[in-house]
Amino acid sequence: MEIEHVQKLERAMKKGRLEQVRFGLGLLFVLSVMLYTASLNDGNVSMTMVIATMVGAYMAMNIGANDVANNVGPAVGSKAMHLGTALVIAAIFEAAGAIIAGGEVVGTIRNGIIDPAMIPDTDAFVRLMLAALMAGALWLNIATATGAPVSTTHSIVGAVLGAGVAAAGMDIVNWGKMGSIAMS
């Protein structure tokens, strides 16, 4: 084998190792969140809560991959700051924004898009919202991986809307709230 071919092979393997490390860190994050959730209820582990936490962690990673790139890209690309500094700043302010201002958004997604009262079975509503979270997370992952422009907010709103319509028909939708979301 020629030295040139060996060097190409080494470069390809190095890129593959980096992808494995990224995947491993993501998996470690999801498993850590699941274990933390399982430890909260004094041995009374709700599998639904653990699964919801797993899907939520997956969604959080997709939101981070999509949104933080928009915030960090210009600062790092212009060489105004190093990637590590930009990521630390982004992590602090993304978390602070979710904690300080995220409650209203959660409330709108929980009961502003669809009318939860139209799904009388609580377990069915939980499964519906879990399916919407998974659908939104998968769409974000696919769009981000392919480089397609995507809105994280519209992804979850569309997923909740679609799941609600699939479960109870068009009457479940709060069209006034959907109009204000669409106009924003």
Image (cartoon, rainbow, N blue to C red):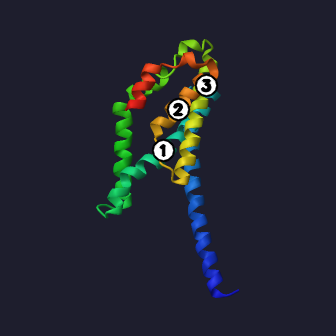
Rendered residue at 35%/55% (across/down): 86
Query: Considering depth in this image, is 108 or 165 the residue closer to the camera?
Result: 165
Q: Which residue is mark 3?
A: 128
Separation of residues labelled 3 and 1 (CA atoms): 23 Å
Nearer to us: label 3 or label 2:
2
Which of the labelled discs sits on residue 61, or is there none?
none
Q: Amino acid at mark 2?
A: Gly
Numbered disc 3: secondary structure: helix
Asked if residue 32 shows in the view, the reply is no
Q: Position of residue 140 (x, y in %)?
A: 53, 43
Query: Which residue carries the number 1 mark?
Result: 150
Residue pushed farthest bottom? 2
Considering only order in the chain, which callout, 2 or 3, is on the residue closer to the N terminus? 3
Q: Which residue is mark 2?
A: 158
Q: Which residue lies most toward the left here?
A: 80
Asked if disc 3 and disc 1 are in contact, CB closer than 8 Å, the reply is no
Q: Nearer the viewer, residue 76 or 180?
A: 180
